[in-house]
Amino acid sequence: MTAAVSADFSQALGPLDSTSVVTEVAERLLAVFTSGQVAVGARLPSERMLAASLGVGRSAVREALAALEILGIVIVRPGSGTYLRGGASELLPRTLSWGLMLGEPRTRELVELRSGLEIQAAELAAQRITDDALESLARHVDTMNASTTNFEAFKEADAHFHREIALASGNTVLEDILQSIRSLLRIWVDRGLRDEQNAALAAKEHTEIYEAIKTRDPANARKVMARHMTTASGRLLNDFAAPAN
């Protein structure tokens, strides 16, 4: 990041005087990220610079960045720095109002809500999807089938696949809500796929969803997405209940 950008970033933050320092730091950073002042993929100023701008200790900044990383908002690359992971449209401005870590009851409720919305999105997409969007879905399915041992590539294709379906639903409110829920559940979704057998099963389920949407069959699209959501949600919640490695 250039000196000019660092200066602008620091000016946008300003000093803090709250007693809940870590939460305040995280909220202030999130506000800047969602304002559009920081480009997607941009490297943030150093912990030292952020601490100086906010008038807090470096430990508070470090803890706030760790919380934002857990929520999938930033990505920390050892030896390189911290980078903004998504654009303003992908971030949920009130994420921290849910708490820096979601509790089990709320996570279960979000998983239930996500399942219902994904099923509805698939049903609508089968009726409204364009040929270009179908081609994109096919590419994502191909990537998943070819990446059952490359979990990072698989998860990225998986996310794009579901985002494409939400977009194809033609319902922008549905699309936005699903994106917000995925942001909140991102860490558990990322942890939920860690072996080749589950990846192969998920790839098969995504292929079935694609075929149902391709044949413009809303009832079948709803059915196969419901089946996928049952297994995907079970995987996520089982991993949530288990202690982290």
Image (cartoon, grey):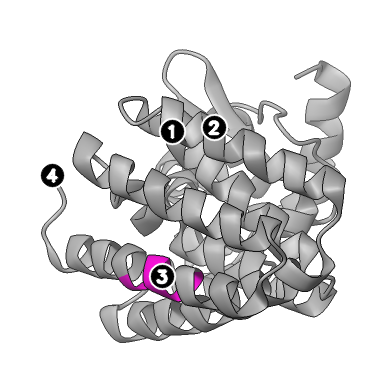
Indicate yes or no whether the magenta region holds residue 229.
yes
Q: Which mark is residue 229?
A: 3
Query: Which amino acid does the dot numbered 2 rest on?
Result: Asp
Relative side of 65 to 104, left or right? right
Query: Which amino acid does the dot numbered 1 rest on?
Result: Asn
Q: Which residues are magenta?
A: 225-230
What's the CA distance linking mark 2 and mark 3?
Answer: 20 Å
The location of residue 69, given as percent across then percent down, is 47, 45
What's the CA distance linking mark 4 and mark 1?
Answer: 27 Å
Rendered-image quadrant of the N terminus: top right
Labelled pair 1, 2 in contact (Cβ < 8 Å) = yes
**Residue beneath the point at 16% across and 51% down:** 244
What's the CA distance linking mark 1 and mark 3?
Answer: 18 Å
What's the CA distance linking mark 4 and mark 2?
Answer: 30 Å
Q: Earlier in the sequence, mark 3 or mark 4?
A: 3
Image depth: mark 1 or mark 3 in front: 1
Q: Which mark is residue 69?
A: none
Labelled pair 2, 3 in contact (Cβ < 8 Å) = no
Image depth: mark 4 or mark 2 in front: 2
Q: Which mark is residue 142?
A: 2
Labelled pair 4, 1 in contact (Cβ < 8 Å) = no
Local secondary structure at mark 3: helix
The location of residue 143, given as percent across then percent down, is 53, 30
Relative side of 148 to 49, left or right? left
Indicate yes or no whether the magenta region holds residue 60.
no
Labelled pair 3, 4 in contact (Cβ < 8 Å) = no
